[in-house]
Structure formats: structure tokens, C-alpha cells
Amino acid sequence: MGKQRFTKNQKKGRKAASLVAEETYSTVPHTFVFQRGQIGRNVGQLVLDIRRVMEPFTARSLKVRKKNVLKDFVAVAGPLGITHFSIFTKTENSINMRLARLPKGPTLYFHVAKYTLIKDVISSLKRHRMHEQQFSHHPLLVLNNFGIEGMHIKLMATMFQNMFPSINVHKLNLNSIKRCVLLNYDPVSQEVEFRHYSLKVVPVGMSRGVKKLMQEKFPNMSKLEDISELLMKGVNLSESEAEQDGDHNITELPQVYSGRGNMASQQSAVRLTEIGPRMTLQLVKIVEGMGEGKVLYHSFVSKTEEELQEMLNRKEARLKEKEERKRKQEQNIALKKEKRDQNKKRSLDGINRKRQQEGQVSDDEVEDPGKPEDQAPAEESEDEAEYYRQAVGEEPDEDMFPGAKRKRGPGKSPKPFKKRKLSQGKGPPHDKKSFKLPDRGNKYGGKRFGDRKPPEGRNRFRKSEGGKKFGQKGGKGCRFAGQKKGDAGKKFGGPKSFKGRAVLRNNRKVLEEKRT
């Protein structure tokens, strides 16, 4: 197949659609769902199920490490456009959930009294409707009984509303609504029931046989003589397939909805199938900031105005103490820096004064103490090397003065010096005059070779015992005892004699005699 080509209008349309989708995606709220601390396997699965509910505007594969802290998630949330956090924790007695609004709060603390996972809800149903296409669009949020008077109730309802994208009724496409999240507040027990449903729309006002024909799976009519039996009597259809539809779930569709028979301006029934998870939440407290700050509401602890004022005073005192401590630290840092600069200037003045007394530099060449060390010229190392050379009388080490360059003659190449290979038995070339000096060994305060004392050890005991040196002839057991110099032809360890020349010389004499 060849490469698919698009016209100019198609390219413009695709580009405009991508821009609109990007703007729409960036304006909707996004949520991070993660855990803190050890929570166990079941609560970990509950975290994954809540991520499933918040799709597609959440991080499904968010990885959380033990060393991560809350500041790490806050730092990452800004560039990614995250607006809410849903944090699960577990203690010895309870399971808690926190809902936080970025970046400055508030934070709502909930106690999870009961919960049920998706797998448990699905296993309890005879027929469940759950497929991957349902999670390509965000769910529809339904709030019930949140109109009760109370600051904490209104704040809780606002928090839940802002976690899901808002809906424009005039521009809404009904085919994008496949799921529903229900939050029901019970004023008696002060608990919030969390439910998650799959949404299905079916036509009404027709017999069960016609509904069966309109489904994707066609019924078995092998035992029927005529199709009228299916339409009129509804043969081979169980009573469980009949749905209890009524005025509570029948509505008139303003648009064409996906599914057979769902036409515009026609009566259809909306059916909900729970797909989980379930949660029963109880509000514990509301904090003003992101995890810390003023407590706006607490369901178990109530304080008077005097206690609240005392808490505010203590908080202000801590903030003032923190600011004072920070100011002192900045002053100490400034004093240390000033003292360091003065010491540096004093040391440079001493060096320059010493060099002026010795005549190394003039007054114009005195180093500026205020100039940083990084910007010092490279010639300074050469001057120091020359000073060392005149004072000591030898070449300085390259490691001591890395910036100093070797001085070479005008006709020599700038290549580095090569080490000369020495032949065996020969030492380095020395000056002949140096060997004739009587104080050659005492030039640097060292001992001469003749001044060394003989070692006192095994050699001293050998001399006292009357032993012989290695290689000495004669004596019992000696291999070379009684041999003369001419008998063996050579001494032990002496140079070998070459007999080739004598043989050639004798052969040459014999040839000359034959010729004559």
C-alpha cells in the first residue's frame, strides 16, 4: 500500500483539531492517586481502582518509591498540570484518604470506613458491563444531599466538583458519557457513599421480541414456524431479561445515542450497572494549606476562640523566630566572607612586600590583592619558577609550578624531551669534573661510598667462622679443585674465548703453503 496523502484542507483540519484537543486537555483537572508508607496488598489494589475511576486524566502507571516525599510530587505536578492529589495511607487502626488542591490547598482528610474492590463487585454480579472504551472519556459526576447548610459540606462538594471536568450542556456529546460517579452524603451518619457505575441506554415502548431482534446477538428461531411467534408471544425469552423500567429512568434523547433503536426525540431508558469500587468515607478535618496550616474544620475536636487565638499566637512566634534565625545566618555568612577576603588580601600584601625586598618585581608589577585567583596571569608561575631557580640553584619540579614553561634555545623544536635509553652496564653520562671533586659525596650533606660501614650480620659470622668466599678454588668438595688455568680453558665466570679467528688463520697458512 502506498503512503496515505492528505489535501491542504485535511491537513488544516487535523492541525486545528489537535490544537483544540491540546487546549481542552490542558484546561481540565488532572489527579495524582498514590500511597504513602506501607499500605498492604488490598489497599494497593484500591489505589489502582481509584486510578481507573479517574481515567483518562490521571497517571495510570505512576511509580512511587519509598524515598519519595511529598515535595517530589509537588515539584513534578506543576509541569504536568496536576491540580489534585488523592493520597492513601494506612495505620494500625484505620485507612485514610487525603484530597489536596494544588498548590496551596485546602486539604481534606477522610477516614475510609468501608471499601470494596472492582473484582469483588464484578464477581457478585450476574452480568456486568465493563469494557475498555468506557475509560476513554471522563465519568459524569452526580452529587446528592450536598445542599445542607455548613461550611465543611460546601467545601467538600466544591472539592469533588473540581476534581472532574465541567460539562457544557449545549456542546456535550452524549456518546462520550459512558460512566457515572455517584457521591451521596448522609446527614445522619455524616458519611459519604462513593459509587461507580457503567451507563447504558436502551429504547422503550416495544416488546421483548423486537428488543431481541435489535440486539447484536440474534435469537435462536429454529423451533418457530413463523417470525410472528417471536414478535407477538416472545417465545424462548426468560422473564429475567425484562427490565424494570419506569418513570424514574425513562427520558427523551436529544441526540442519537450509540446502540440500536436509540434515536433522537425517542423514549429511552437509562440503566446503571455498578462496576466498582465502593467506598464509605467520613470527613475528619479540613486544613487550610497543603498538608499543613490552619485547621478550618475538625469533626472530633472543637476549640474555643481563646484556644484558637493562642494557637495563632504560637504560630506567629515560631515564624518570627524562624525569620530571626535566618537573618542571623545571613549575617554570619557575610562576616565570614569579609574576614576571608581580608585574610587573603593580607597574605597577598605580605608576598608582594617580600618580593619587592628581594628585588624580584617592581612597584608597577605588584599583584593586586583584590584580583581573584582565577584571573591571575600565567606569567606568575614563570616568575616563581625563576625565583626558585636563583634561590636553590636547580631546575624546579614541573608539578610544583605547572604553569611554568621550559626554556629552550632558539633553534630547538618545542617537542618534549625524550628519555635516553641506556645500554647495559653503562650508567648515565656525568661530567668528568664532578668525579674529581673531593667533596662530591658531601655536596648535599650525604655520605660518600667509602664512608659506609660494613654490614653486621651473616657476613660477620661467616668471617669469624673461617668460611670461604663463593667461587674460591681449592678445598674439599670443591668442583674446580686442582685445575689449572689452561686445563679448563677459562675461568669460572670469566669471558669465553673465541677460537674462530685462529682456525681461519691456520687454514689460510695451509692454503698458502700448497700454492707455493
Image (cartoon, rainbow, N blue to C red):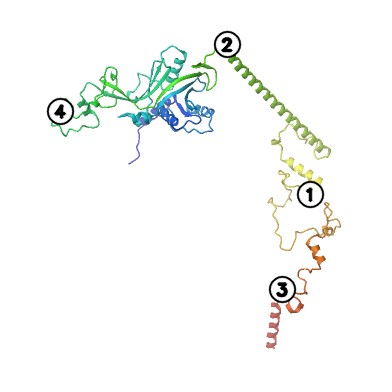
Label 2 crowding class (10 Å Cα cut-off): few <14, some 14-19, many 20+? Answer: few
**Which tag, 3 or 2, sits closer to the chain's start?**
2
The answer to whether mark 3 and mark 4 are in CB contact below 8 A is no
To which residue does mark 4 refer?
229
**Which tag, 1 or 2, sits closer to the chain's start?**
2
To which residue does mark 3 refer?
496
**Would residue 384 be found to the left or right of residue 185 on screen?**
right
The answer to whether mark 3 and mark 2 are in CB contact below 8 A is no
To which residue does mark 2 refer?
306
Foreground: disc 1 or disc 3? 3
**Would residue 108 be found to the left or right of residue 378 on screen?**
left
Residue type of the residue flagged with mark 4 = Glu
To which residue does mark 1 refer?
394
Q: Quadrant of the C terminus?
A: bottom right
At x 81% / y 47%, what residue is drawn?
392
Along the line of sight, the residue nearer the viewer: 361 or 444: 444
